[in-house]
Structures are given as structure tokens and as C-alpha cells.
Amino acid sequence: MKQLLILSGKGGTGKTTIASAFIKLANAKAYADCDVDAPNLHLVAGWDFEPERTDYFGLPIAQINQQLCIECDRCRENCRFDAITNIEGYNVNPFTCEGCGVCEYVCPVDAIQLKPAAAGELMLYSHENKVFSTAQLKMGSGTSGLLVTEVKKQMKESAVDTEFAIIDGSPGIGCPVIASLSGVDMVLIVAEPSISGISDMERIVSTAAKFGTKTVVCINKFDTNIENTEKIKEFCEKHDLTFIGKIPFDIKAVEAINNGQTIVDIKCASGTAVKTIYERAMELLFNTP
Amino acid sequence: MTIAVLSGKGGTGKTLVSVNLAAVAKKSTYIDCDVEEPNGHLFFKPENVSDEEISVKIPQVNNELCDGCRRCVEFCNFNALAYIQEKLIIFEDVCHSCGGCVIVCPQNALTEKDRTIGIVQKGHSNEVYVKSGILNTGEAMGIPIINSLLSENKDVCDDMIIIDCPPGSACIVMDSIKDADYCILVAEPTVFGVHNLNMVFELVKLFNKPFGVVLNKCLEGENPAELFCMERNMKIIGKIPFDNELGLLNSNAEIVTRKSNKYKELFLELLDTVKREVQHETITNP
């Protein structure tokens, strides 16, 4: 399965808008939303029935049995995450506990146990030969990278014979992004022509390069700052990144999204531009080594 | 007074709001907790900058002492250790620095060393003290940098601290808002914006933080984010119009309140509203 991952570094540059357009254009049989912190692709993916839901268990969380606890303080002393407090007895803060198990190990009276904790929900939409895998991380949870891996696994297992998949990524460069990069064939970076956007693009390019993933770049809302658009193109040339096109700012894109449509469902300038970018991306994904 | 600026979705204008609030408050501290993609420093261009390296503890093995018992491998819940071909291998980038392997090793073959994951950068821009956390690319976890950014503000005696949070609602955001007296939720008028606003709304409710919403990129006509706020009785404390002049200044990393009187007034008014809200909170919920 050839996998195309859409990333941006900076949030709000148009990852999901472009991913949904690509899915429509490709009539994609397999796709996933790996922005498990703030998933949005389901809002425009056009599925009008409920998905199959599975609880996602991240790392376990420590629990202290107050009856057995002798208040020796060893758990609190050894916890590197400051997850244990001794206000009105010893307790674990479930939001800061990382499930390492050190407290369980150092407790001399076996008062501490690691217990599985639901950290989110996996969702799978499937109909005829199409699958869409997505998830929602529980608030404050710290295992987004593992959940991203699960989302991709769920997609692959449900679409074994599918030759092409589109993955919508998350902003940033950390844990979930690194997890989404593993095993993909090409990354499309959606850049935005602002000083912030350029800085963030440089950081995501450097992250993808560390994992050796082939990377191509497009610019969204290019006409909001032509000078910065030129800077992005120069950056691509200098770093041997293939630049595959630019999309104008388009008020109709906002209207389409707010109606639950993709930008290629209506006639608009951004939809026309994204078609060219899609064709170039497919060419590069399938026809270059 | 500590104000956290957040939004589930990226690109709604967190940095625009936090940078400009800090800039119009006479003396303030701006803290950029979006350590994966920090942008505040691009606007402030702080002077007299000093960098401090932030590191985490990771294990190192003394192969002469290791007898291959694999207790560390079995203990590690993060799969950061493996014993392959009679050698202990440590995967530094998945290590969570819990220190467990060192504790369980019966041979004392494991010790810890520092591994740099990024920096905290401090400097001044006019009257604003600017602190940014910058995670090295390729690193997965920025939390230790956020902790370092937030730990020492007790000695900053400024009356206004503005925290620019990362997007999302995961652990990294929770860490950023834990000490805040008030949260500003920035939302944009799209269905994506509304969906993600709902997530941070749940987050601030969970932590019982007083909050207000700033609507950004407001266009004429119906605003789904505004409707959402009205339906749920969420207080709207400011509206920023969709405006090409603002967009251009902001995309060139200019601080709009230092360039335009119109926006200086808008953000001064927002700052006053926030201060009033916080005072009101301290009176009603001391």
C-alpha cells in the first residue's frame, strides 16, 4: 500500500481541506485522520452513519490501595513525573502518571498496581470497499503517538488489498507526527506564506528528513503574501524539495467546508488549483523511485 | 495574573492574541509553550537573548557489569531497551526518563546521563520579557521544556504573564494551563474551528478554569463559532475581524498593536476585559 501523508508543522494551514479534496479526487479506498488530538476529517468525509467504535487503552496508570499503604513515601520520592501526592493519603494524578511502573516496583507492601486506562477511542467507518480510520484522544492524555500507530494499523488491516492510502496528519513535530511518519511513502507539506509558517515548515522538513521520508511542498493561500510565497519556493529549491503548486486564498473554500463539502465538490479557484497539485503528487508518488 | 491562550485547532490565532496582549500590557512576560512550533519569538525579535539547554536523563550501560539478566528490558513499559546478540541496546528517543531500569538492575550496570532535547530562550522586547521553549527536531516529547518554562515564574514579579499554548487538548496543553488564573479560547468561524473549540471548552471545564472566547477572522454573516458560544452560554470577550491589513502584518511577523492604532485599541480593550473578568473571579471564587 502506497501511503501519502499530509503534514504542515504549523496548524491551520489547510491539511484537512487538502486531504479531503485529495480523497474525493482519488476516490480513495483507504484513508485515515492521524490528528488524534483534534480530528476534523470526519466532518467533511461524507459518512452519514455511525462508525464502529473501540476503546483505546494507552499505557496503564498506577493506583494506590490506601488500605495497604504504609506512607513510606518511596513512590513519591521515585516518581519522575511528580504524579504522586500525599495530601489526605497517597494518590496518583492520572493526568501526569506515565505508567512507567517505578512506584509499583519500589512499594515495599505491594499497595500499588498498574491498571489499564482508557485513553481514547478508535473509530472505523467502512462501507463496500472503502475504509476511513480515525480516533479521538481523551483530554489530557499523553499517548497520542501510540494512538496514531493504532489508527494506521486499523486502516491497513481493514484495507489489505488497497494500493493507495491518504493520511491526514497533526500539527507540530513531536510524538504524533513522528508516529504518523513511520512507513509512509511520501509527505506532502502544506505551507503557509507567513514568517511563522516558514519557520514551522523548516522544522517539519527537518523532522521528515531525519526519518528519511520523501517530501514535497505546496503552498496554501499563496496570494496573502507573495513575498513569503517566493521565500518558500527558494527554500524548496535550495533544499532539493519538489514544489508542486500553490492554492489561492478562497472565501468559497470556507463556505464549502462549513457545508460539509470538499473544495472539489464546488466550482472554485482553490478547487481548481488543488487538482493540479493532486495530479503532480500522484505522478511523484507512483512514477518516481 | 497568569493568562493562558489556547485553541484546539491550530492556526486560529493563539499567537496573534497572546503576543499582542503581552505587547499592550505595560510590563509583561510572554511564555511560548508551543515548543514544537514556537513562533512568538519571531514577532518579538527579543534582544539580549540567552539560551539554556534543557535535558532529560537517559540510561547508559556499563557492558562489563551487565550480565544479560534482562530485568531492565522486561521492566521498561516504553520498550526503550532490548538485549540483542548479548548486548544491551538503548533506544534513547523512546525513553521516558522514568529511571526504572537503573533501579531494577541488580548489577548496578546502568547509570544515567543527560540528553539535550531543546532550549529555553529568554530575552526582552521593549517591556515584554519573552521566554520561548524550542524542541529539537526529531524529538518526540516537549513536556520537560514546558515544565522548565513554567517552573520559575514565581520569581518573575510582573503583574501579567501570558502563556501561548500548543494546539490540541493533550497532556502538553494541560501542562501549559495548569497554573493559569484565566483561559482565553481563540476560535475561528468554521465547522472545524467549532469542533475543536468544543474540545478545549471541555478541557477548561474539567480543570475548572474561568475562561472567555475570542472570535478571530470574523466575516460578515453567520459565524458558527459565535452560535456555538451563545448556545452554551460561553462568554465572548472579543472579536477580531477578518482583515487583509491585519493578515499581511501578521504574516510578516509584525506585532500589529505596535503598527496600527486601531488594533492597539482593540487589544487594550481586550486586556481590560480580561483583567475585569479575573478580578470578578477572585471576588466570586476566591
Image (cartoon, coloured by chain):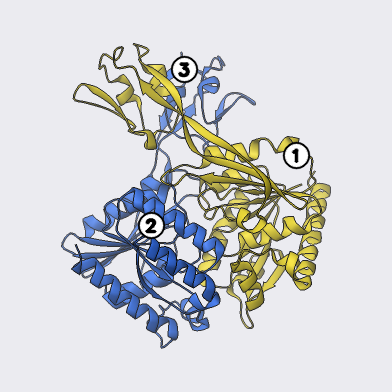
Cα–Cα span, label 3 and label 1: 38 Å
Q: What residue type is labelled 1?
A: Val
Q: Which of marks 3 and 1 is in front?
A: 1
Q: Is mark 1 on a helix, strand or loop?
A: loop
Sort mark 2 into few (<14), some (14-19) or many (20+) by Cα contacts within 10 Å. Answer: many
**Of all residues shown, which one is farthest toward the left?**
A161
Q: Is mark 2 on a helix, strand or loop?
A: loop
Residue under mark 3: which chain is it in?
A: A
Q: Which amino acid does label 3 sit on?
A: Cys
Label 3–label 1 contact, CB within 8 A: no
Residue under mark 1: which chain is it in?
A: B
Left or right of B239 in this view: A16: left
Mark with earlier residue (2, 3) = 2
Observer-nearest of A191 and B159: A191
Cα–Cα span, label 2 and label 1: 39 Å
Number of marks in the image? 3
Cα–Cα span, label 2 and label 3: 38 Å
Observer-nearest of A174 and A50: A174
Q: Is mark 3 on a helix, strand or loop?
A: loop
Q: In which quarter of the image is residue A91?
A: top right
Left or right of A56 in this view: B141: right
Vertical position of residue A151 compared to residue A253: above or below: above
Residue A268 appears in the picture as rendered? yes
Chain B, chosen colour in render: yellow
Chain A, chosen colour in render: blue
Q: What residue type is labelled 2?
A: Cys
> Badge 2 is on which residue?
A34
**Marks 3 & 1 on one chain:** no
Q: At which x and y percent is residue A216? A: 34, 65
> Badge 3 is on which residue?
A107
Sort mark 1 into few (<14), some (14-19) or many (20+) by Cα contacts within 10 Å. Answer: few
Q: What's the mark number on residue B156?
A: 1
